[in-house]
Amino acid sequence: MMEAETPRAAERKASAPAGPPGRLRGLYRQEAEAWRRHYRKHFKTAARALGAGFAIGFAYFLLRPDREAKALGIVVRALKDIPLEASPAVLALTLLYHNARASAIAVTAGWVPFLFLPILDPLLNGAVLGLLASISKHQGLNVPLLFLTQILPHGVFELAAVLYATSLGLYLSAETGKRALAARRRRKERRKGVVSAAPGLSDFLETYPDRKADEPESLAWNVVRSFLLVVLPLLALAAFVEGFITPNLG
């Protein structure tokens, strides 16, 4: 006969470290907080850049159809390592690698402070979509239907990943810029011999919660966590849909 669980045993069980699922939930809770505090505003900026890129690309090539062939050739050369005739599995894996590499480059560009270079990624993606829409229009194709069947199914996940990766890069650029300015200001103060008065114990205790909340976070940890938890899964979904589903919708 099994003995009833004692209160002390139940307490030990409740306080035992959570397994991997619990740790994963904790990571996603951190990600949700980072989204609210840091990424959401940059995501909106990236979405506007994507829309602007599409509008500019579509309008430009609609008015200058003589430039379409050259621009399309550049796009094709950039995608030449993607085996479109390969099996769905090989195509999906190649797409995942290609898109993950592009997103990683966009995020890494955010380490350059002040310049906000990652914004170029959604601008270029939008311009390519505008180019494809213009070409389809000039060929007399049904552009909305083409986008609905050939781009939207995987594009929902892929573009979301592009925008999220861009928001990570913009966050990096903004934060590295702020910290560079703060470090420069501290160096100037040291050169001038500016020394702030040491706070008393009461001041230390009263301001501790606010100062703790303002402590700089690990930029690298935030970005790596976000890339692994959000960007890569979205790109994996996009690659699966584009490799296995999109070809059958034409």
Image (cartoon, helix red, strand yellow):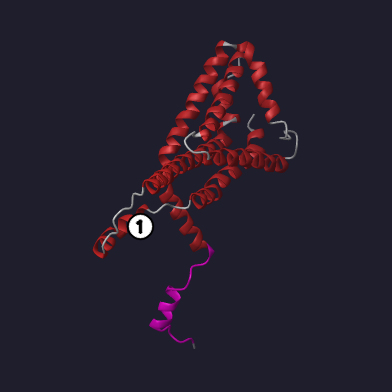
Relative depth, front residue between 123 and 111: 111
Amino acid type at image mark 1: Lys
Relative depth, front residue between 140 and 8: 8
Above or below: residue 18 compared with residue 242: below
Residue at (31, 58) in percent of width and height: 209
Q: What x and y, as percent, mark residue 155?
A: 56, 34
Residue that sits furthest to the left in the current view: 202
Above or below: residue 183 compared with residue 12: above
Locate the C terminus by quadrant. Answer: top right
Residue underneath mark 1:
212
Q: How many marks?
A: 1
Relative depth, front residue between 173 and 56: 173
Give the magenta-colored segment's residue range: 2-20
Q: What x and y, as percent, mark residue 196?
A: 31, 53
Above or below: residue 178 compared with residue 214: above
Relative depth, front residue between 246 and 115: 115
- At label 1, counting other C-alpha atoms closer than 10 Å, the crowd grade (few under 14, some 14-19, many 20 or more) is few
Query: Secondary structure beneath disc 1?
Result: helix
Report if residue 100 lies within the magenta region.
no
